[in-house]
Image (cartoon, rainbow, N blue to C red):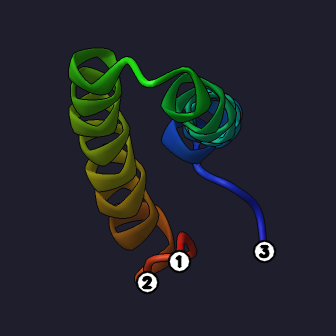
Amino acid sequence: MTSSPDEKIMKPYLRKLLREHRALNRLIDTTKAVGASEDVKAMKRLRLRLKDKIAALQRHYYGRSLAG
């Protein structure tokens, strides 16, 4: 099965979003240890927006969400 042009563009973009999400998870864990609660809250909101975007793209292109 061949990929559509949109899918060929979206796969690398989706991988980039997943990398950003994982990096943000690590940063949140590190920041929590320092006790910067306002920064953690802002990063968690950003992480949630990333997760929602990832899930929407996965549903659109693959018919299901691959993010857990």
Residue displayed at 43% across by 83% down: 64
- Looking at the rendered structure, the kind of residue marked 3 is Met
Question: In the visual, does 13 lie left or right of 38?
Answer: right
Numbered tag placed on residue 48 in the rendering:
none
Residues at marks 1 and 3, CA–CA distance in whole angstroms? 26 Å
Q: Position of residue 30 (x, y in %)?
A: 65, 28
- Looking at the rendered structure, the kind of residue marked 2 is Arg
Q: In the figure, 65 relative to 4: above or below?
A: below
Name the secondary structure under disc 3: loop
Q: Position of residue 16 (x, y in %)?
A: 66, 28
Q: Nearer the viewer, residue 13 or 28?
A: 28
Mark 1 or mark 3: whose residue is earlier in sequence: 3
Q: Quadrant of residue 17?
A: top right
Say whether marks 3 and 2 touch (CB < 8 Å): no
Q: Which residue is mark 2?
A: 64
Q: Which residue is mark 3?
A: 1
Residue displayed at 29% across by 59% down: 56
Q: Which residue is mark 1?
A: 68
